[in-house]
Image (spheres, rainbow, N blue to C red):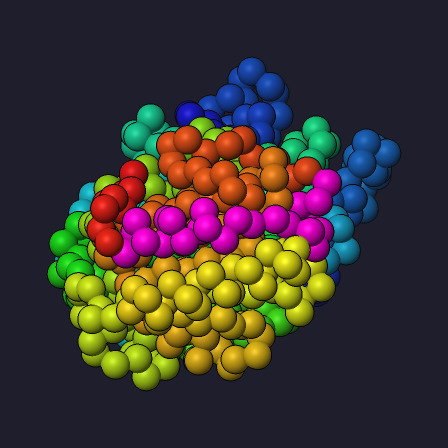
Amino acid sequence: MAPSSFLPGSKLFLSPIPSYLPLHNPQGPISPSFLKPFPPIDHPHHQHQSGRTPRVHHPLSSPLSSTFPSSSSDDSLSTPASWLPTRRELLLLLLTLSSLALFFGFGHMDIDYTDSNGLAKSVTVGLGGQHHRWSEGGNGVGMWDEEEGKEVRGADGRVDYLETSLVQHAPGWTIFSNLYQLGSTFIIVTSNPAAFPEIRMMTSTSAEVFNGAEAVQSREPTEKNMRVISPEEAHVLFRSDESLHHFGLSPIRQSGPTWLVNDPPQFLTHYYHFGAELIFGLWRTFSSMDRGINASGETTHLGMPRRMIFTATGYEHWRDYSGMNGLIMKSVFPRTKLEFSQDFQLDRVASARPFVYDQLVFADRAASMRGSVFARTGRTASEAFLLPGSPYWFAPIRRKLLQYVGVPENDLAPGHRHTDVVTYVSRQSWGRRMLKEEDHEELVRVMTQAAMEDGFEFNVVEMDKLDNQQQIRLAARTTILMGVHGNGLTHLLFMKPTTRSTVMEFFYPGGFAYDYEFTTRGLGMAHYGFHGAQRFTSPDTPPVAYPEGFQGNDIPIDAQAVLEVVRMRLSGAEEADDG
């Protein structure tokens, strides 16, 4: 992946960032067109080749049609009156001379943009022979600090920008240090482009996810979404010296961890996709920076994100019907500022200034779908498990939520419960994806009898009949969670992982999906699937399939086959599969 070539003597296009030049403009707000390479324009030392004087554009000039006369208007110069310069022509001449004085011998760069009337305009930025320092590492970027409310410079008074570094990466899950944003474009500043993966493995257009070649292509990113530039190019783009303060291009530093979700709202209003995919993947990625997380959920240095940005999801499209998404955010991330697409567009894309993120976890569903692990599991968060991590990586999230809902300490601390709890999540009143009624009744009878004989606690629950906090408290006590494939099994996130902890999932014969199988094993617990009397577990899982009947109400289950696995797991006869 090579950076675009727009060194001195080339053009840099910016878009769609309205009004990044805070000057009075009689034509209305300015909306730059986008960062892309442009053929070199004439430079003073090229005059002997082209025979033309370079044009220097200014944002206050009128539309191109009037600023630069057409050939017919050039003919009017033969009239005596035309040799008398107007005030406007004198102003343009002075601007031309001052601009040439600024960058003569040092090269220049044109920033082209489109104003609110759709007219192409340009402003020239000269290098002036002065370069900012660029260095790797350090504790921050000397620029406008949002928290301090002032511009921060080094001891020598110069601005210290930092190159972007890749902290961690798996397809769709990337941690950057010092990633820049200008308008809707994320910018990697690096002198070593080869250190970064392909752009398409990190981001997308955030278009909705549908099948078909055209839909797949619509998600492929362009340089409008993310691009790589060199430090030399960044010197020009992010100038902040006194001579160019009016351009307003000095970045605003976003200190602390930021989580950015570049997903469409398509899946986020579902508890499983929000909790067991998005939050699951974000925290798995973030926690890869701390392999010392222990079973009690204590971290050595990780904090919580200061802000969570949804670039393509509005504030009205992230809550699920059950309210679980809101409960997770309120309990686990109470101090995290949520920014939705409305905020992103108004406060960041349309900002007069670029941003630089100290630490950014960048999540992109479409990019993760390009990974090899997703190809096997169909689970976007599965790619994040390519990263290093603690076996107790999820413990901080679990502990925070369980403390919020009032779970006692004995269900938070590591280790087995004195009494095992088996919870059957029934869907028999749900109207879709239900067991055969006779099989449901037999399962309840057999399990109730076994509980009395073996001394474990057995619960039959319809989750929608309990409030959210009751549901979470029950999941926290549960050793074995069972039920037909469905949203209620998402509570496995909050079970205590032990060598007995198990999820048992009932499918219509021939059907299978990795949703809860992958999530269970990602937490170090065992998963068993059932097709009637037939059971299976990793690595011998069937292929993903959704046959006719998968969503139906005649799903069979053999109660004795279920009881056999329950007794095996509670006896410790077989250790949990942590693979």
Tell me where residue 440 appears, x and y as whole percent.
58, 60
Vertical arrangement, residue 422 with respect to residue 468, above or below: above
Q: Position of residue 391 (x, y in %)?
A: 22, 50
Q: Residue at x 24, y 54 (%)?
A: 571
Instruction: For residue 399, say whether it is visible.
Output: yes
Quarter of the picture containing the C terminus is: top left
The answer to which of 575 and 47 lies nearer the viewer is: 575
The image quadrant of residue 500 is bottom left
**Closer to us: 84 or 432:** 432
Q: Is residue 459 left or right of residue 232?
A: right
The furthest residue to the top: 49
Residue, far bottom:
406
Q: As displayed, is residue 311 above or below residue 48?
A: below
Asked if residue 558 is among those painted magenta in the image, a careful observer would answer yes
User: What residue lies at 57% left-to-right and 79% top-to-bottom?
Assistant: 465
Quick one: quadrant of the N terminus? top left
In the image, taking residue 572 as reference, residue 184 lies left or right, namely right
Bounds of the magenta segment: 548-570
**Figure label count:** 0
Please tell me whether residue 206 belongs to the stretch shown in magenta: no
Q: Position of residue 185 (x, y in %)?
A: 52, 47
Whether residue 225 appears in this view of the structure is no
What residue is shown at x 37% (from left), y 59% (from top)? 480
Judge by depth and name the residue closer to the eye, 25 or 313. Answer: 313
Front in this rendered view, residue 512 or 247: 512
Q: Position of residue 574 (x, y in %)?
A: 25, 44
User: In the image, what residue occupies the spot 41% across and 60% down?
Assistant: 481
- Location of residue 205 by image quarter: top right
